Image (tube, rainbow, N blue to C red):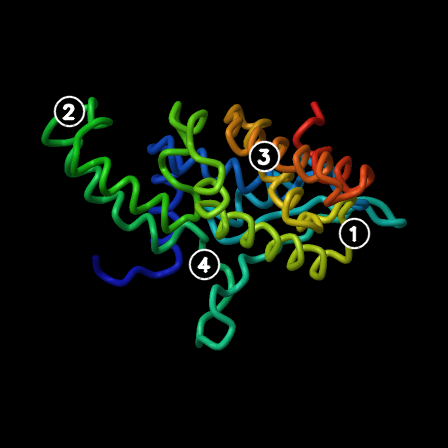
């Protein structure tokens, strides 16, 4: 695909977000993750809307609560690579969603029932991998996916959210109500589990694996009851 200017990138990403459900699902998961448990100066809805726009268009608006009243701040998407000669404000979805052009081509040939087509699935999985969320975790297979595979598959997702929370915290001068990176191996993916659950994706095998491991560690006196409770709380909270 020929090199696009920023306006073309944004239009392409908006179209991909609106058309392909798996792209939209991943954006919504990220918006849910960055806003997880909220912060001190911005309502959760405003965080979600701003993050969604950053990922899709490259710039998000955030309604900041200040002593002098409400203030709307526009925040560009940060550069992906700090040392590159690149301006901030490029959509997160770009350039990974370039391949949606080929999905459009497949749809033109075989019609709207593209899901299940082998070539379509290969391209969709590649796009999802580039965006940090395995394609398989967006459908019914998420309920039976191996817990370790889920952790491995969502490493980039978890890291991106931390990066963006740190970035917004610095740019907007806000404090998050909870730390996204929870201490300890067992509790580390509790926030991720919660985010997916809110978005209607139950990573139950991840939950069950952590709960069983924590119980075994507690029963074997490898961890204290306090550590056990801290490890499992995000997996038990409604």
Q: Name the residue that disc number 2 marks.
A: 111
Left or right of residue 46, residue 178 in this image? right
Choose top left, top right, bottom left or bottom right for residue 137. top left
Q: Which residue is drawn at 24% across and 43% down?
A: 123
Which residue position is annotated with label 1? Answer: 175
Q: What element carries label 1?
A: loop
**Residue at left offset 43%, top offset 29%:** 142
The residues bearing labels 1 and 4 have C-alpha atoms spaced at a distance of 25 Å
Residue occupied by mark 4: 90
* Above or below: residue 238 compared with residue 61: above
Secondary structure, mark 2, is loop
In the foreground, 70 or 235: 235
> Residue at (29%, 46%) from the top-left corner?
126
Count of labels in the image? 4
Using the image, determine if residue 85 lies above or below residue 31. Answer: below
- Relative to residue 85, is residue 138 depicted above or below? above
Counting residues from the start of the chain, the first of labels 3 and 2 encountered is: 2
Mark earlier in primary sequence (4, 2): 4
Q: What's the CA distance linking mark 4 and mark 3?
A: 29 Å
Image location (x, y in percent) of residue 237 = 71, 27
Q: Position of residue 120 (x, y in %)?
A: 20, 36
First of labels 2, 1 by sequence position: 2
């Amino acid at each position: 695909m020929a090199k696009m200017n920023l306006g073309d990138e944004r239009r392409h990403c908006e179209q991909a977000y609106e058309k392909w459900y798996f792209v939209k699902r991943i954006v919504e998961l990220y918006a849910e993750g960055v806003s997880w448990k909220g912060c001190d100066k911005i309502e959760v809805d405003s965080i979600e809307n701003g993050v969604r726009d950053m990922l899709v268009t490259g710039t998000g608006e955030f309604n900041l609560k200040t002593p002098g009243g409400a203030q709307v701040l526009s925040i560009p998407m940060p550069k992906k690579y700090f040392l590159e000669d690149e301006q901030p404000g490029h959509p997160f979805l770009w350039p990974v969603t370039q391949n949606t052009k080929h999905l459009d081509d497949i749809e033109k040939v075989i019609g709207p029932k593209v899901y299940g087509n082998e070539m379509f699935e290969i391209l969709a999985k590649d796009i999802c991998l580039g965006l940090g969320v395995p394609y398989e975790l967006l459908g019914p297979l998420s309920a039976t996916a191996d817990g370790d595979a889920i952790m491995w598959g969502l490493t980039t997702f978890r890291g991106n959210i931390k990066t963006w929370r740190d970035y917004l915290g610095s740019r907007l001068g806000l404090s998050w109500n909870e730390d996204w990176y929870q201490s300890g191996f067992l509790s580390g993916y509790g926030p991720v589990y919660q985010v997916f659950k809110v978005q209607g994706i139950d990573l139950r095998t991840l939950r069950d694996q952590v709960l069983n491991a924590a119980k075994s560690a507690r029963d074997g006196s490898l961890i204290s009851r306090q550590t056990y409770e801290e490890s499992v709380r995000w997996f038990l909270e409604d």
